[in-house]
Image: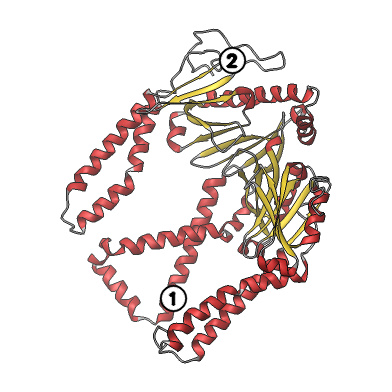
Amino acid sequence: MTALPPPTGEPLAPADPGTPPPPPGVGGAQDWQRLSPRMLLVHPVRAIRSMIVPLVLVVFGVTRGDGNSFWFWAAPVFAVLAVLFGVLAWFFTRYRFTQEQLQLRTGVLSRKVVTAPLDRIRSVDLESTPIHRVLGLTKAKVGTGVDDSQIELDGLTRDQASSLRVYLLQRSSAAEVDETEEPGAAGGSEDAARTGGPRRGEDTELARIDWGWLRYAPFSLSSLVVVAGAVGVLGQFGDDLPLDETEVAQDAWGWVAAQALLVLVAGATVVVVLGWVVVSTASYVLNWWNLSLVREAGGKIRTTRGLLTTRSQTIEEAKIRGVRMTEQFLLRFVRGAELTALATGVGSDGTTRLLPPAPRRVVQEVGHALLEEDGPLTMTLTGHGPRARRRIHVSGQWGTLFLAGLAAVPTWWLDVGWFATWPWWVPLAVLVGVGLLNAVVAENAWRNLGHALTDRHLVVQTGAVIRTREVLERGGVIGWVVHQGLFQRRLGLADLTATTAAGAERVVAPNIPLGMALDLADAATPGMLEGWRA
């Protein structure tokens, strides 16, 4: 990392002979240092980009004749102020490495200093937006694995960021080796034995993008949400677009309006479907371009991906406590799935996406490679029995009963409402249809419900529209919660929750027979529920 200023103070010595020496320019100076001055070009671009939406809204408001020109002149002033604050943020941002810590000082009006112990760093994420890539810069996000907070060094050169990632993770691995070798460090030894620890000799590629997976992109429900949002925006501002001022547009709309309603519905359907396919495919390519999932020597998992904005995420494998395989409703028809890691203190809410929509077989193979155990993602699960089925079906029909009451009270009793002028069989047909739909969803939820226990993992599967199978290390379970609602007690059912520090901090097996729940918890963590039955 030669681009950093030369050290002016005492060079940082390794914490012990096993700790790797710092690369040039990293950890060698105790004076506060600035980020790359090229960030002075990045901050104005960010400020202008953040002002695009307000400026568009202002332009639309002025063109619609609101008669208020204040915002028309105020918007550029706000943009200039945003650029100014961005430049000041660079001047007031400093970072340094001490013997034991990484320190970051920020703030224009109020000052803030954030620190991270060098031997406790568990993840280093690198991200480069298009403007970063043009200027040869990278943003580094450093996490300690304690919580979701990270230290961001936004403005390192590519070489600096790469050297920093290697140095920090090697230093934390060396510190972990020392801890696991100390007498009494049983927990650390377990993690090292489970992941192979820093004794892994070479990098292993677990997965790489296959562009045949693009066929799974349109089956992601998130793309449909994006298309619906775009349609809503067009509907909001469609009247302001100057399309009706051209004769061609008027003639085209006149021809369309003169056709049958079926043609309009079919055309709208085709447009939505095509938009869905285009948006989902483009999003897939932008986010997952050049995906590579690698298990690095030293017990680290590194994911790199992205076309315009490139991302490289590295987390300590000992922090990964399990995985989640998600099968959305449409993906299940084409045998596709997604894979997410359940970790402590990294990613978003303790989860990190590892694979996009891909063949279920590939997801299962990669998941088993991470878990270092075959079976949790493919094994047959134990169902929760007929009482759970009855409970789920009854719960699913509460919405139908609510809709029936909502329609019956104003229509048949008060003789008002939009049902009042319809034949009696129309609302009845609607209610029957809703009831059948809820019954199908409830039956699907019951069929997907199950659990299992392997030598090393707890497996729980839930979901109706979106089926998820969560696999959690038995060693990652830190407690159990057994909850029984009023109706569950009558059926002898309970919701069994395994609490953990990873992911959403809990894995729930709902509507499980009480005796089965206690047996499962006792088998997963022997002795933890000792004396509870009495």
Q: Nearer the viewer, residue 35 or 243?
A: 35
The C terminus sits in image quarter: bottom right
Residue receiving disc 2: 99
> Mark 1: which amino acid?
Val
Between 410 and 376, the residue placed more toward the observer is 410
How many neighbours does mark 2 have within 10 angstroms: few (below 14), some (14-19), or many (20 or more)? some
x, y percent for residue 390 = 71, 73
Whether residue 19 is situated above or below residue 120 in the rendered picture: above
Instruction: Give the mark toward the camera: 1 or 2.
Output: 2
Front one among 393 and 495: 495
Q: Is residue 416 above or below residue 56?
A: below
In this rendering, the answer to whether 91 lies above or below 358 is above
Residue 474 placement: quadrant: top right
Q: Nearer the viewer, residue 106 or 268?
A: 106
Q: Position of residue 45 (x, y in %)?
A: 36, 36
Query: How far apart in space, not on screen, are marks 1 and 2 (Cα)?
Result: 68 Å
Q: Is residue 513 visible?
A: yes
Whole-percent x, y for residue 227 in the image = 46, 60
Residue name at image x 59 percent, y 12 percent? 12
Mark 1 lies on residue: 265
Mark 2 belongs to which amino acid? Gln
Query: What x and y, as percent, mark residue 197?
Result: 75, 30
Q: Earlier in the sequence, mark 1 or mark 2?
A: 2
The reply to whether discs 1 and 2 touch (Cβ–Cβ < 8 Å) is no
